[in-house]
């Protein structure tokens, strides 16, 4: 024991001496005389003899702050003109190294705060700012853990020689500052003046979150409505705005590593290698290439590293569920070219049992793969090449009667299937200069989907609905923006181009052997109604935003976007087919165009009341372009109009108890004109027309994080939404829906997680997730009352391994995930029942 302590002590001394030696050359380049630096005092008497008189002195002004990377880390100089600063002893708070300097004031020529973002790969942020009572605070934030620093005093000022702590030297504490890139510049979460929820790498891993369902369940006012079988019919909503219109742009935009993913029906994917997820609520039009009316889900995966690393997870659970994940990363050319490979494979039996066929109904199988290369030939160039694929072979969409006593036990004559294959490629090139940054992102994404399923819900062979689609999306984004270190003025200008080809390769209905008994004796078995169509959407946009800080606590932001979308329905053919006879044309059109454009301004203001509290307000324009309908069954439904809105928002972000508690609140009001209401064909369940309505949405979000004790964490969120039609009459039936709730807009969502990690390896986590009353159609005839789900994890963690038991939906709550009014019958899909399992994870 004593020998170990001695060895640790000697190692620490040698580390500090190495840091000092390696830093000297770089600091000398700054014009400093390191010979003037006092040796570190070894005892109180020596320190007193070296230090200035402790009697009251004039407050010392820090007139300059300089940073210089060193071989071992970073050197930070606080430069003074007169006097001498007293040595300080930094403390560790989460991933922050904090030092408070007494009898000093920061007096820089260009402001009262210094900030540097990502000065090294291991340091995310350096800030130097004034506190009350003539104190200056230095905060050095590590990317994953707090750095280590030796502080020396000299006539020139204070020098912090910083190195990144080794993994076994990291010090745990009760706070953690989260750095986000939501506004295209790394910032601390609490300093970003928008409604924003962040799930960090540790939080994602602790909750075992690898799907959009899991992300939504832990985010206020973000909801995912997914069936247990087919992955391609998932609806998403933020603040009540959802993506029911299958072929149009989503109000929610999804980005994975800067790649804008295809529209909602093609993005219900596994995400096994996550680093961070940022959910931005409200219109996001002036910083991102693809515009979004409701918000953005910005998904960031783990990046290639300069050191060899490996991680894996193996899970086995209910319904023979097997989930395998792995990732490996390392250098190809040290300090210059790096790679990362990751992927997963998952399979499970179905939750639904088709007793008529004695088969599972909604089984799943498939996997993903991702390859990344990062090349940094110089300090000014950063090039990333990414490629990924997804391939899923699943059971049918679980379309069942919602009023059955046991909906998971069904009797149908046909099980059906669904398949989804996607692949994407992206090239990101960044050029960095002291005065600006340039970023180019080129992407391609292809999706192919096919399905066939039962529609009549009986053992009779009456009706099926086969369908097949493919989509190809090309995008190009170019941004020019201020350097990350710019404090008083941040600006960005950009351009965006998107081309999307969406082909309906055949959707419709097929009549079975028993169809004549339902539809009449003239109905021929095998006859079908089939629609095919080709469409193309072309979007181009320019955007920009400027944030100016006239005085330190006040920040003013103005942004503007112009966007133009041209939609073309090249061909649409609907035919009726009888085996052995020529096709009968029901509808045929060519070259249907729809153009929409918009100017989208944003105005925002934020004011820092104190280092612990910021208030903000914003007004922004929302927009969802019009388009053409590839499922139209009449000329009146070929086109639909653009959707436009204004979003008014105020909020406050606060921290308490030395950053152990964070509380963020936002309030919003969002009136929407020409809201796109998708009406569904009761046979195919695809959008046969899109109507426009006026709606009003008002609500709030509350995010709370607390770390009262070491190892004990609480995360909570609450979202409230009042979303209703203010002017909507169905043009076909004449029914008036004014005052009805919007479909897929829960009245509230809440999430709560409590977890405890002991010093000896025990890990426990308990989650509570709730969803308020939700309607699934504009007539509000299909609904789900409020419900709550409980999830639990219990594990034991070693240095490089962890073993966990888990239970999801612990009390087997039954709830409707999706619903339709199927000719007067309530039909749809239920959420997953209770599942249990075991998981083993490793990391090297």
Image: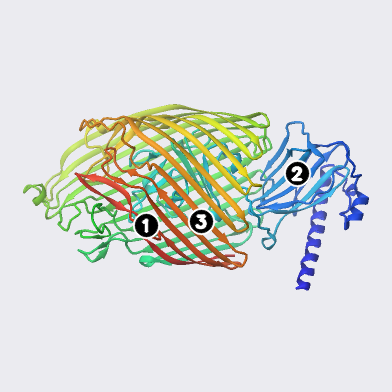
Marks 1/3: CA distance?
18 Å
Secondary structure of residue under mark 1: strand
**Number of the front mark, 2 or 1:** 2
Residue 804 is situated, as x and y percent measured from the top left of the image, at 50, 66
The residue most toward the left is: 521
Point out the tag, 2 or 1, that comes first from the N-terminus.
Answer: 2
Residue 421 is situated, as x and y percent measured from the top left of the image, at 37, 53
Secondary structure of residue under mark 3: loop
Q: Is residue 36 left or right of residue 262?
A: right
- How are the residues colored? rainbow
Point out the tag, 1 or 3, that comes first from the N-terminus.
Answer: 3
Disc number for residue 392? 1
Label 3: how many residues lie within 10 Å, few (<14), some (14-19) or many (20+)?
Answer: many
Q: Residue at x 37, y 57 (%)?
A: 392
Residue 292 is situated, as x and y percent measured from the top left of the image, at 45, 36
Along the line of sight, the residue nearer the viewer: 210 or 336: 210
**Number of the front mark, 1 or 3:** 3
Q: Quadrant of residue 52?
A: top right
Residue 469 is situated, as x and y percent measured from the top left of the image, at 31, 47
Marks 3/2: CA distance?
33 Å
Label 1: how many residues lie within 10 Å, few (<14), some (14-19) or many (20+)?
Answer: many
| Vertical comparison of 436 with 334: above or below | above
Point out the tag, 3 or 2, that comes first from the N-terminus.
Answer: 2
Q: Residue at x 48, y 59 (%)?
A: 343
Marks 2/1: CA distance?
50 Å
Disc number for residue 67? 2
């Amino acid at each position: 024991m004593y020998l170990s302590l001695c060895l640790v002590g000697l190692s620490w001394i040698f580390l500090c001496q190495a840091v000092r030696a390696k830093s000297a050359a770089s600091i000398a380049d700054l014009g400093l005389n390191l010979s003037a630096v006092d040796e570190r005092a070894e005892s109180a008497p020596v320190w007193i003899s070296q230090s200035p008189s402790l009697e009251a002195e004039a407050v010392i002004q820090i007139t300059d702050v300089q940073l210089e990377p060193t071989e071992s880390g970073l050197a930070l100089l606080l430069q003074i003109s007169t006097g001498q600063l007293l040595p300080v002893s930094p403390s560790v708070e989460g991933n922050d190294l904090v030092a408070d300097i007494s009898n000093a004031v920061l007096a820089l020529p260009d402001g009262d705060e210094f900030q540097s973002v990502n000065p090294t790969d291991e340091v995310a942020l350096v800030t130097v700012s004034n506190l009350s009572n003539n104190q200056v605070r230095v905060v050095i934030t590590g990317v994953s853990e707090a750095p280590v620093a030796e502080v020396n005093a000299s006539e020139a000022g204070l020098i912090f020689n910083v190195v990144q702590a080794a993994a076994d030297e990291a010090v745990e504490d009760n706070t953690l500052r989260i750095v986000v890139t939501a506004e295209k510049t790394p910032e601390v979460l609490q300093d970003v003046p928008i409604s924003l929820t962040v799930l960090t790498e540790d939080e994602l891993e602790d909750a075992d979150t690898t799907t959009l369902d899991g992300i939504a369940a832990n985010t206020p006012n973000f909801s995912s409505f997914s069936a247990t079988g087919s992955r391609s019919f998932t609806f998403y909503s933020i603040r009540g705005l959802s993506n029911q219109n299958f072929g149009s742009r989503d109000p929610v935009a999804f980005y994975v590593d800067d790649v804008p993913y295809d529209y909602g029906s093609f993005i219900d994917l596994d995400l096994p290698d996550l680093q961070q997820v940022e959910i931005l609520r409200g219109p996001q039009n002036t910083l991102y290439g693809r515009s979004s009316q409701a918000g953005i889900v910005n998904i960031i995966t783990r990046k290639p590293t300069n050191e060899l690393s490996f991680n894996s997870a193996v899970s086995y659970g209910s319904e023979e569920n097997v989930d395998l994940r792995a990732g490996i990363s390392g250098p190809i050319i040290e300090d210059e070219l790096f790679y990362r490979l990751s992927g997963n494979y998952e399979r499970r039996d179905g939750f639904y049992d088709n007793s008529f066929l004695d088969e599972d109904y909604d089984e799943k199988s498939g996997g993903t793969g991702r390859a990344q290369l990062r090349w940094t030939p110089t300090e000014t160039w950063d090039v990333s090449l990414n490629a990924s694929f997804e391939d899923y072979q699943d059971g049918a969409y679980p379309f069942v009667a919602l009023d059955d006593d046991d909906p998971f036990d069904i009797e149908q004559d046909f099980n059906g299937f669904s398949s989804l294959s996607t692949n994407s490629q992206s090239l990101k090139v960044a050029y960095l200069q002291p005065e600006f940054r340039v970023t180019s992102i080129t992407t391609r994404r292809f999706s192919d989907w096919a399905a066939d399923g039962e529609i009549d819900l009986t053992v009779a062979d009456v009706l099926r609905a086969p369908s097949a689609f493919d989509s190809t999306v090309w995008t190009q984004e170019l941004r020019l923006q201020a350097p990350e270190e710019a404090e008083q003025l941040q600006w960005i200008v950009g351009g965006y181009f998107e081309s999307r080809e969406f082909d309906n390769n055949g959707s419709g209905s097929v009549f079975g052997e028993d169809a004549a008994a339902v539809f009449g004796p003239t109905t021929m078995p095998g006859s079908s109604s089939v629609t095919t169509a080709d469409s193309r959407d072309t979007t181009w946009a320019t955007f920009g935003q400027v944030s100016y800080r006239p005085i330190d606590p006040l920040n003013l932001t103005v942004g503007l976007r112009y966007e133009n979308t041209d939609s073309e329905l090249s061909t649409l053919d609907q035919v009726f087919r009888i085996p052995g006879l020529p096709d009968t044309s029901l509808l045929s059109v060519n070259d249907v165009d729809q153009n929409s454009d918009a100017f989208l301004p944003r105005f925002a203001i934020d004011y820092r009341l104190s280092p612990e509290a910021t208030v903000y307000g914003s007004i922004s324009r929302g927009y969802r372009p019009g388009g053409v309908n590839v499922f139209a069954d009449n000329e009146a439904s070929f086109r639909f109009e653009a959707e436009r809105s204004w979003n008014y928002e105020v909020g406050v972000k606060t921290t308490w108890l030395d950053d152990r508690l964070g509380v963020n609140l936002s309030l919003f009001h969002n009136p929407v004109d020409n809201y796109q209401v998708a009406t569904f064909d009761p046979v195919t369940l695809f959008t046969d027309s899109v109507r426009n309505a006026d709606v009003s949405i008002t609500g709030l979000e509350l995010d709370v994080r607390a770390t009262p004790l070491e190892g004990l964490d609480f995360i909570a969120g609450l979202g409230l939404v009042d979303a209703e039609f203010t002017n909507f009459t169905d043009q076909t039936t004449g029914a008036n829906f004014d005052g009805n709730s919007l479909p897929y807009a829960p009245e509230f969502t809440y999430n709560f997680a409590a977890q405890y990690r002991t010093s000896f390896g025990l890990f426990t986590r308990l989650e509570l997730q709730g969803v308020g009353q939700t309607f699934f159609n504009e007539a509000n005839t299909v609904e789900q009352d409020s419900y709550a789900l409980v999830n639990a994890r219990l594990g034991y963690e070693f240095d490089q391994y962890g073993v966990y038991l888990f239970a999801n939906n612990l009390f087997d709550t039954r709830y409707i995930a999706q619903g339709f009014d199927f000719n007067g019958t309530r039909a749809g899909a239920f959420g997953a029942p209770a599942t249990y399992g075991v998981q083993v994870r490793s990391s090297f």
